[in-house]
Amino acid sequence: MTLPREILQRIKEIESDTTSGSLAITRKAAITVLHFVVRMQHSRPSDVRSNLIRISERLIHAQPAMGALVNLAGIMRTVSEESEEKKLSQIVKAVVKEYVRQLGESSEAISLSASRLIKNNRTVITHSFSSVVLQTLLRAHNQGRRFRVICTESRPTREGLTLAKKLGKHGIPTTVVADAAVFSHLSNAASVLVGADAVTRNALVNKVGTYPIALAAKVKRIPFFVLCCSLKFVPDRLIPSTFALQNPEEILGPRRFRHVTARNIYFDSTPLAYITRIINEKGAFTPGKFTREAKLSMRPNRFRPLP
Amino acid sequence: MTLPREILQRIKEIESDTTSGSLAITRKAAITVLHFVVRMQHSRPSDVRSNLIRISERLIHAQPAMGALVNLAGIMRTVSEESEEKKLSQIVKAVVKEYVRQLGESSEAISLSASRLIKNNRTVITHSFSSVVLQTLLRAHNQGRRFRVICTESRPTREGLTLAKKLGKHGIPTTVVADAAVFSHLSNAASVLVGADAVTRNALVNKVGTYPIALAAKVKRIPFFVLCCSLKFVPDRLIPSTFALQNPEEILGPRRFRHVTARNIYFDSTPLAYITRIINEKGAFTPGKFTREAKLSMRPNRFRPLP
């Protein structure tokens, strides 16, 4: 039995979503799985199992750099392989719901710790759009701190502008700079705050342009903070060695020029050595401590309902 | 006597030229001065002198980060102050023409040396648009070398695209990348080649985004070459401590958003320590050697016709 067309369509949308953050995309994936489980409730249990495994593979393939999604799919796969067929739908439903609940809870906890890092009358630099960074900055603002945010434009999809507008709407004074110009502002900033698509034992995977900012921040001794829940930690081998090529028209425009191509890549890898602290759901840790903790917390059992 | 309206208009155009390279802009300035001299040939010599001094000041103010222009204006000023009034027009004319001639000759010589740095089957990265870099790459291509060029988009004015199209037209395979993505390509490049707006004893002034590329190239041990004639060398004090703010709409678009501003700056400063070699009209030098040589070659007398 092949996957229902509607589910394939949803996975395709996840694959071509070039603007949402990784948590939003992971939620979309969870909804897709829940949808599938409801739809398949009268199907043969063996079909449900094989299709759940197929969905998990396709989800990883759709956004292989997004740790939270890769882990959701990985846990789904393990649970699908190991659970009793008759109870599988119920178990997967519970696991996916619990995973999404933990994701949300982690974001809350992270924004609570991280908001304490935002001091009065200082400037914070961020890059790209991260929902947890947005949550953190709004929380600090609501707690009465007055600060300024510098957002990078974040070409090619310019999601930094989206973040700036949201911050501005809440009354936070925000300055947008070209991606190439953010380095000129580092020396006047108190810190850099970014989200994460994934963290491995060696690197932070995040929107392209994160690496040079972290490098320059290290050289200029500006603290570089990454907001990242444990559920985004993945083994190195799960991160592709080269990231997917996106639509070249986003760089070149609709016209073609002889001998001219574009390489449009959305992610880069930052060595963990450039990162001051990773803030997860339990607090602020050195990258080494973060990865040790995260490895322990990734057992699929954590998400399974009690028998 | 105030400056003729037409001259003021030409200086204004130089000030608002956001896309030409610094050599093209310096040539525009030279034409403006020659124009003025012709126009004023029947005016009182003291008016010519005072107006030449005024023009030199306005030219520096128009593009204070462009060394070649700043030096042209400085030499004009010295010559105007020191020369006999009656001969001043003729002397300034000769000096300006000689300066422009030397600029062109230097570009030729630089592109000749620098083209030897471009090796077969390698990738060269460049940033922004530099006429000398273009000349160098075309020369290497015409000499039969086959190589690939990676151009940054170079937001906000995207002059990297202009360079890519020119290279492509001549059959050089060219790849355009977002400014934030160029760092991901460094490890596969043989070298980085950029032009210069100015070089001081401490820093290279060039299109914003040059600094992080030079820093990352240093860390990744990729040679970073700057093509810069001696006429672009200026004392540190002549470079403004903060660069001019350009039109924020280039970043934000035409709409306004509450509490959101843009800082649109075109230049940054790169410590000379990140630069492997500066190629001037005499060859490839360490930054220290380049500045020592350049200081010696900047005497106004060099440009004066023999009495």
Image: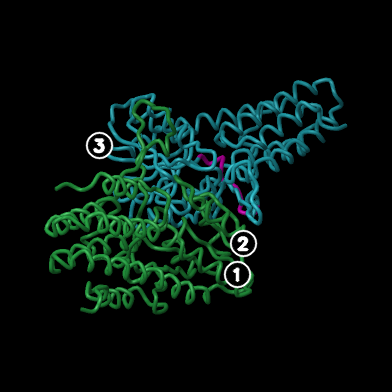
Chain colours: A cyan, B green
Q: Position of residue A25 (x, y in %)?
A: 60, 33
The one of A2 and B85 positioned closer to us in this rendering: B85
* Residue under the point 23% across and 65% down: B92
Chain letter for mark 3:
A
Query: Where does the C terminus of chain A fall, quadrant-wise?
Result: top right
Extreme residue toward the front, this view: B42
The one of B179 and B143 positioned closer to us in this rendering: B143
Q: Position of residue B173 (x, y in %)?
A: 63, 61
Looking at the picture, do discs 2 and 3 lie on one chain?
Answer: no
Q: What's the distance in space between the residues labelled 1 and 3, CA to CA?
A: 53 Å
- Magenta-drawn stretch contains A78: no
Say what amino acid the circle numbered 3 marks: Asn
What are the residue bounds of the magenta stretch?
Answer: A229-237
Q: Quick check: A93 above or below A213?
A: above
* Residue under the point 68% across and 32% down: A13
Chain letter for mark 2:
B
Disc 2 target residue: B170
The one of B198 and B214 positioned closer to us in this rendering: B198
Q: Which callout, 1 or 3, points to the residue nearer the camera?
A: 1
Q: Answer whether labels 2 and 3 touch (C-beta < 8 Å).
A: no
